Image (spheres, rainbow, N blue to C red):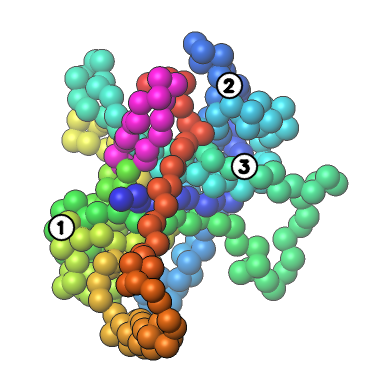
């Protein structure tokens, strides 16, 4: 049983690219992209701002980034969310940071340079910040109400990443995603979704910062969902079509002469092998 963990963003590199080498000789770099955003609030107000995302790029893609990507370059990144955890050497506290591991990178700037944004077409000039996950809910929904009276719900969703290492052994890594849901959708999810349910979640990636009581800075990366679909449920509309198709197939089969009922066999679902370009032995953590 497989899950989905995919992110698509379009943003602008904020600083010079520095490529480094792992002990095994693999190239790797961290891009730092700023992604402007604009979306309507529940009150209809247009909210504008910008988010910052760390993108880790491996192998030949990292070498291309080091050679061609400059501060201000516009890039498309397709990848997956990954959270790294460690223990602070000074305080002993557990720390974590969520980043995007790139699977694809496309440089978007024309050869003659970036164009000026046309007037009167703000939606055409929007960039992309989209995340899609399919996974299992790790805790029951927690509904809260903001000071302004808005409903906000949080759930956890777990996804799995599988790969095969150089020794041929299957490896697996689990990612835990914090999902935030607002408004009417939050109310519906709180009624329908429970711990253990399999869901599809789609939205945008957001990282927010705050200070602890001791003055330490902390960050949290969340998926702000605009779509939540409960999976593995029956559909009356789909069932009608399935039953009608099955009846037609049975009618056609009964009219065909067969030597034995054993001639009709169910097709086996082929085994699909999922592999990752990211090798565990090359990870620097």
Residue denoted by label 1? 195
User: What residue range appears in magenta?
Assistant: 161-175
Q: Residue 237: image x %, image y %?
A: 33, 86
- The answer to whether 170 is drawn above or below residue 80 in the figure is above
Q: Where is residue 248 in the image (x, y as percent from the top left)?
A: 40, 88
Depth check, front residue: 249 or 209: 249
Instruction: Give the secondary structure at mark 2.
Output: strand
For residue 156, side relative to residue 84 (left or right): left
SS assignment for the magenta stretch, majority: strand
The residue carrying pointer 3 sits among few (fewer than 14), some (14 to 19) or many (20 or more) residues within 10 Å by Cα, namely some
Q: Mark 2 points at which residue?
A: 27
Give the mark nearer the N terminus: 2 vs 3. Answer: 2
Q: Position of residue 65 (x, y in %)?
A: 66, 32
Query: Percent from the top left, x then y, of residue 272?
Result: 43, 47
Toward which corner of the image does residue 71 lie, by quadrant? top right
- The quadrant where residue 238 appears: bottom left
The answer for how far apart the CA atoms under marks 2 and 1 are is 40 Å
> From this viewpoint, which residue is outermost toward the top?
23
Q: In this view, does 71 lie above or below 147?
A: above
**What mark, if any, has residue 257 been given in the picture?**
none
Mark 3 secondary-structure assignment: strand
Q: Which residue is drawn at 22% across and 36% down?
A: 212
- Residue at which label 3 appears: 105
- For image coordinates 34% across by 31% down, the residue present is 171
How busy is the neighbourhood of tag 1: few (under 14 within 10 Å), some, or many (20 plus)? some
At x 55% / y 57%, what residue is drawn?
A: 128
Asked whether the residues under the numbered discs 3 and 1 touch, taking CB atoms below 8 Å apart as contact, a structural biologist would say no
Q: Is residue 75 left or right of residue 3?
A: right
Query: Which residue is at the front of the view, 58 or 10?
Result: 58
Query: In this rendering, is residue 112 above or below 281?
Result: below
């Amino acid at each position: 049983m497989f899950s989905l963990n995919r992110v698509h963003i379009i943003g602008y590199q904020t600083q010079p690219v520095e490529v480094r080498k792992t002990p095994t000789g693999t190239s790797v770099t961290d891009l730092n992209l700023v992604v402007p955003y604009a979306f309507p609030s529940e009150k209809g107000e247009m909210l504008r701002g910008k988010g910052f995302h760390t993108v880790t790029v491996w192998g030949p893609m990292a070498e291309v980034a080091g050679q061609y990507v400059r501060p201000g370059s516009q890039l498309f990144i397709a990848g997956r969310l990954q959270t790294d955890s460690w223990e602070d050497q000074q305080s002993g506290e557990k720390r974590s940071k969520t980043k995007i591991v790139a699977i694809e990178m496309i440089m978007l700037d024309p050869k003659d340079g970036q164009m000026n944004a046309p007037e009167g077409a703000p939606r055409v000039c929007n960039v992309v910040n989209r995340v899609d996950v399919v996974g299992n809910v790790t805790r029951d929904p927690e509904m809260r109400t903001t000071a302004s009276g808005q409903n906000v719900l949080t759930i956890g969703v777990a996804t799995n990443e599988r790969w095969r290492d150089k020794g041929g052994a299957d490896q697996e890594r689990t990612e835990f995603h914090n999902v935030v849901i607002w408004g009417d959708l939050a109310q519906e999810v709180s009624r329908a979704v429970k711990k253990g349910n399999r869901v599809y979640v789609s939205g945008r990636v957001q990282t927010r910062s705050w200070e602890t009581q001791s003055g330490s800075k902390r960050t949290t990366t969340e998926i702000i969902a605009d779509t939540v679909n409960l999976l593995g449920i029956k559909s009356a509309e789909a069932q009608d079509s399935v039953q009608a198709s099955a009846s037609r197939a049975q009618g056609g089969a009964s009219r065909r002469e067969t030597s034995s009922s054993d001639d009709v066999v169910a097709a086996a679902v082929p085994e699909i092998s999922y592999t990752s370009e990211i090798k565990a032995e090359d990870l620097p953590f």
